[in-house]
Each structure stands twice: as C-alpha cells, then as structure tokens.
Amino acid sequence: MTDPTNGLSTTVGDIVTYIPKTTAALDNIDVIAVYPCGGPTPTVNVECPTALHTFNSSLSTIVSTTEGSACAKSLGGRTLVHGKVRGAVNGKFKNGDYIFIASSTSSLDYEKLDDGWWKALSIDFPEATQGTGNECVFYSTDGIISQVEDC
C-alpha cells in the first residue's frame, strides 16, 4: 500500500480485556501495538488493577452445545464475577461483557466459562426479556458473552 492509512480508521475505540489473578502480588504485563508503517501511532492506556464485581446467583453447572439443551439444564448456586465492557451496572451482564465464576464461594480464584451455551437467571441479563421461569441462556466465547436468548 502506498498510503497505509488509506481507508483505515485512525481510532479503534476502547479495547477491554480482563486478566483475573489470584494474588495481590505485583505482576508485569507486556502490551504490543501493531500498526501500519507511516500511519498514526496509537495511544495505549493500560489501567490496572480494577476490582471485578462478585455476587451470588444461579448458573447451569454444565456447558451445552446448543441453546435448547442449555434451556433444559437445571440451575445451581454459583458465585459469578462480572467484568464490565458494555454493561454499566455491576452484576447486569450484557453482550460483550466478561463473565467468570469463582471456583468456590469463598475463593478468589476466578475461572472463565467454557465455550458454549449456559443457562442463567434473566434478572442478571438486561438483554433478556424475562422468558419462561425468568431464565435465559447465553453463549460464552473465551469468557465473553456473545449472545443472550430467553428460554
């Protein structure tokens, strides 16, 4: 390309990622920004740490491969962890937000959900329309909510 910025946006907006950690020990994070030669240089801001919102709710105990099979699962008490990206309210997940679970109710060890469909309470998902039994399903990809549907 003779002009590497031709047709490319000079701003990408906010890119958010959460890296849960299990101790208060200091860690290093390396950030690598790749951009076209001769193009505008990006501004990179790294903010850390930030507390994730942890609360008790219900979630299926097993991941499903289809929306229908997830709706058929029963719910179990789980400690959910909310990493806001699109959501503005703690504990109210939206598409694009991060969702983790605590490995136990007294643990600060967070785990991302396996990829697939999960059943949850609609009250925790404002994009659900409070389906039958106030339950919904969502799709998790690498710990990120990508779709919310009513059961």
Image (cartoon, grey):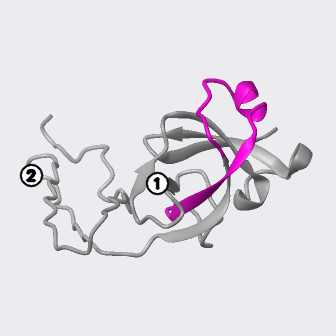
Side (left or right) of 76 relative to 145: right
**Disc 2 versus disc 1: nearer the observer:** 1
Amino acid at dot 1: Ser
**At which x and y percent is residue 20?**
35, 60
Give the Cα separation between the discs numbered 2 and 1.
Answer: 47 Å
Q: Residues within 10 Å of mark 1 (few under 14, many from 20)?
A: some
Percent x, y for residue 114?
48, 37
- How many numbered marks are there? 2
In the structure shown, which secondary structural element does the residue marked by tag 1 occupy?
loop
Kind of residue sitting beneath label 2: Gly
Q: Position of residue 62 (x, y in %)?
A: 60, 35
Tell whether position 67 is magenta: yes
Where residue 94 sits, quadrant-wise, is bottom right
Horizontal side, residue 36 vs residue 54: left or right: left
Q: Nearer the viewer, residue 97 or 38?
A: 97
Tell me the SS state at disc 2: loop
Which numbered dot is residue 103? 1
Quadrant for the C terminus, please.
top right
Which residue: 31% across, 75% down? 49
Q: Which residues are magenta?
A: 60-85
Which residue is disc 2 drawn over?
38
Q: Looking at the image, which residue sits at the far right?
A: 132
Marks 2,1: beta carbons within 8 A: no
Q: Would you identify the image quadrant in which residue 70 lies?
A: top right
Does residue 114 belong to the magenta stretch? Answer: no
Drawn side of residue 151 relative to residue 96, left or right = right
